[in-house]
Image: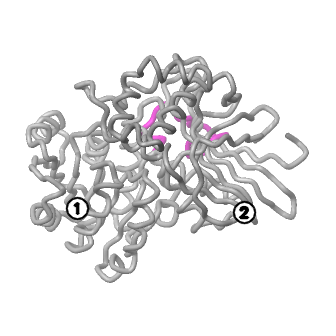
Amino acid sequence: MSAVKILALGGPGAMGAVAVRVAAGLPGVTEIVVADRRLEAAEELVRRLRGSGTAMRPAKVDVTDDAALRAVLRDADIVLNTVGPYYRFGMTVLSAAIATGTHYLDICDDWEPTQRMLGLDEEARAAGVCAVVGMGASPGMSNLLAARAVEQLDQVRDLYTAWPVDVPGDSGQVDEQLVDPDGRPGAAVVHWMEQISGKVAVVSAGRLVHRQPLQPVFLALSETCSGTAYTVGHPEPVTLHSSFRPTGNAANLMVVTPGTLAYLDVLRRDIDAGRLTNETAAADLARPSTSRALRATVRATRLKGPGSLPPFFAAATGTRDGRPVTVLARLAEAPGAPGLIDNMAEATGIPLALGLAQLADHSRLRPGVHPPETVIDPGRFFHDLVHHVPALARDSAAPGGVTIDVTEAGRR
């Protein structure tokens, strides 16, 4: 394997730092440049990871400075882009990577820029650049779970991916990891406000359409697994529609308690009415206001909860051997152990680094702009994931750390 130089844009961030830590242990990765607009943050991460065995150095880069961005990209073989929100910076970094001939991975979880970045496929092919868009938790790991579910079907009707905001038994408070150490909402929360407002992409009757978010979807996946989750604007419907052509419905869903969902719906209404921006809504979510909390309390009584749905999964319905079936694919996490999805930084950064592993050894380098499910090998990905996440089951009942449940219609 040839030596590979990595540029980690936004590396000092929570998710980028996890990706850098894992990438430093990958075979063939000989150098990582940790780049950020805050040089002191890049220097601190390099100090923390000193002794990893991989050469590291910090760099100061503002992605809005095109000349500086291209200069640092030219020295890298692959760039890991964790600079968000992607509806602002995704196209900027990918376009520069294509221009410099640098292979590219990111954790883009905005559906609109995902569509635009996929539109650069022809330019990437001409430049010999392989770009993977959305290689985090959702999208990313969720797409690969969907691929595992679809493998069980001859024809795909409905296809859903889902991720947790909170789960029954929690306090109902939004994950504190979404708030920066200084108390201000980070890019992830600003992104979230973008994707619970306006219109989002879903698949309806086999067609990609735009609908209001936070719509309820009831899922009955088995005799013991059913509940209601809510639509949100992640990119999975866009890419899975193209990759697997479901003939029915597809959406990305939040598994969320009624109290939190009600507060998000209050924010959505105020954003759509122009009373809040994404930034001010994100700040309000970090420190909920009394008036909006009261409005949410009234709405929560009318909302349905997640029931017995797992927190993170992909579910597909369709036919196999002429029979209608439902397939549930989920991480096989050990009961009682802290799960991967309990830590947003780990759940996003580790998949990004494992996607890098497949590009770094040139096994999946295919020029063009790709969603994860068309270029990342899901079998290898989940096999590698088990080695980085001890909570994943390591037994014959869940090979590769994934549980696949297939239920025939009439047996739920």
Could you tell me which quadrant the N terminus lies in?
Answer: bottom left
Q: Is residue 402 visible?
A: no
Left or right of 359 on screen, residue 75: left
Residue 180 picture location, percent across and down: 28, 30
Residue 221 against residue 108 in the figure, above or below: above
Query: Secondary structure beneath disc 1?
Result: strand
Residue 134 picture location, percent across and down: 42, 55
Q: Nearer the viewer, residue 218 or 151?
A: 218
For badge 1, the amino acid type reads Val
Residue marked by disc 2: 205
Residue marked by disc 1: 4
Looking at the image, tell me whether mark 1 or mark 2 is earlier in sequence order. Answer: 1
Is 354 one of the magenta-colored residues? no
Span shown in magenta: 385-402
Q: Is residue 288 visible?
A: yes
Residue 92 image-quadrant placement? bottom left
Q: Nearer the viewer, residue 98 or 112?
A: 112
Query: Secondary structure beneath disc 2?
Result: loop
